[in-house]
Image: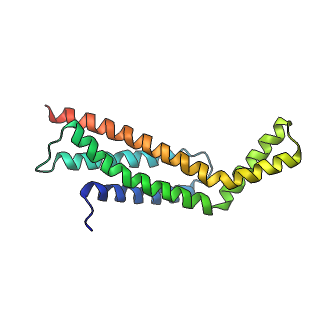
Amino acid sequence: MRIGKSAGIGLLTGITMILTSLLCYHFFSSGNGQWQLLIYGIYAAGIWAGQYQFTISKDAQAGFRNLFSEGFKVFMPVTFLMVLFTWIFMKYDTNLVNQMAEAYKNKLLETGNRTLEQIETEVAQSKDKYATFFTSLAIFGYLIAGALATLSGAIFFSSRNKR
């Protein structure tokens, strides 16, 4: 099976994002998530690299529609890899789940409108749904970010080719 150039760029981008995520989590696991901007920057750069690669190919007609299609071919493998990574990471990083559960429990205790038994039940239920919740957020987040990066790259490269 032969992987197209754009899909290959998408796979390389996704792997780079996963490795960067793991490195940032290991070295900067403060929980504030500011390094997530770096991950999205790598994502956008990968999409734009795929679109740029398409514009310089010999037989490409680099109109908006074709450039958007190439960006889509890059961001779909990235989205798949990042969603899979997010699910696996959230499912097996019990420390992160426990931190979330403790913060949620403290928040519920502050409100004072539930019994201790109700709080314990809600916290246990939230721990079960944590991986699914964050995976859902990853799906929508990466799809939206990918579509925006693809759109901006298609607009930029198609307007550049008209000159």
Res. 26 in view? no
- Could you say which is closer to the camera, residue 84 or residue 37? 84
- Could you say which is closer to the camera, residue 13 or residue 69? 69
Give residue 2's position: percent from left, percent from top.
25, 66
> What residue sits 39% from the left and 49% below the top?
42
**Left or right: residue 144 compared with residue 94:** left
> What residue sits 79% from the left and 44% below the top?
106
> What residue sits 25% from the left and 57% below the top?
5
**Left or right: residue 8 compared with residue 145:** left
Which quadrant: the C terminus?
Answer: top left
Give residue 80's position: percent from left, percent from top.
43, 55
User: Coloured how?
Assistant: rainbow
Give residue 60's position: percent from left, percent from top.
14, 47
**Left or right: residue 97 compared with residue 148:** right
**Above or below 37: residue 77:** below
> What residue sits 20% from the left and 48% below the top?
54
